[in-house]
Image (cartoon, coloured by chain):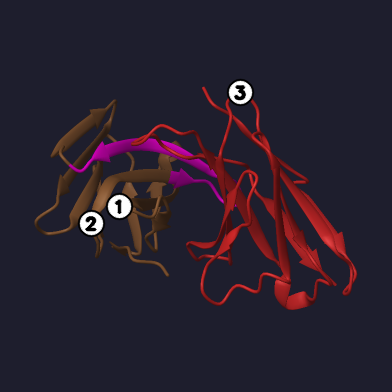
Amino acid sequence: SQQGEEDPQALSIQEGENATMNCSYKTSINNLQWYRQNSGRGLVHLILIRSNEREKHSGRLRVTLDTSKKSSSLLITASRAADTASYFCATDARNTGKLIFGQGTTLQVKP
Amino acid sequence: GAVVSQHPSWVICKSGTSVKIECRSLDFQATTMFWYRQFPKQSLMLMATSNEGSKATYEQGVEKDKFLINHASLTLSTLTVTSAHPEDSSFYICSARDALVNQPQHFGDGTRLSIL
């Protein structure tokens, strides 16, 4: 069963603005991963943050992890129209090896 | 980087047909592969974990006789949708991981299955 909750479900912003997506989960994890999916395509891995890490950066992406609150956020700075996609968080749960996905946030960046 | 190839990308077939989908890890050995199902505008639902050389582990509510999984080698897992019906129409995605902990999974591009 899915264990991740994401908000917002949908986000529409202007090019150049920042986009923030939040993810919450329920169980202990090894790591939390963020993925991007363009319509009708597979998933592209964006960033992985381990359970002992609190913040990670990759280009215009910034991910935070708060294991005490069982939550994570993905910030995309200076958004571009090409960032339009669905974004999913996924938790790599301890002792299972499975990757469980959140419900996703659909991001639309208007040019 | 690691690549996972999924084939075919699109299948349209008649009700009652069995359909096989292949998932290959191209440049690494994957002892474990995963099969997901995704309905339009929804998230990925894990169907089963495919283990090389042993039986697959299915998630609750997934019919193992309906969705046959074979992981015959370290680079290939197959999902066969047996006697497919229109309600089986969906987007099926596989992923693979190597043996290292705290590494991302690598996803195929998915297979769009349409049953008429």
Chain bearing mark 2: A
Q: Is residue B104 above or below residue B28?
A: below
Residue B53 shows up from this direction: yes
| Residue A72 point in image, percent of width and height | 21, 51
Kindly indicate whether the residue at mark 2 contacts the one at mark 1 (C-beta within 8 angstroms). Answer: yes
Q: Colour of chain A?
A: brown
Q: Is residue A40 magenta?
A: yes
Q: Nearer the viewer, residue A76 or B98?
A: B98
Query: What amino acid type should be assigned to the residue bearing mark 1?
Result: Arg
Which chain has been coloured red in this picture?
B
Give me the residue at 17% from left, 43% from top.
A64
* Callout 3: SS: loop
Can you identify the residue that label 2 sits on? A28
| Residue A89 point in image, percent of width and height | 35, 52
Magenta stretch: give its range. Answer: A36-51
- The quadrant holding residue B69 is bottom right
Chain bearing mark 1: A
Residue A16 shows up from this direction: no
Query: Viewed as shown, does residue B74 lie left or right of A93?
Result: right
Query: What amino acid type should be assigned to the residue bearing mark 2?
Result: Ser
Can you identify the residue that label 1 sits on? A94
Query: Could you tell me what secondary structure mostly forms the magenta stretch?
Result: strand
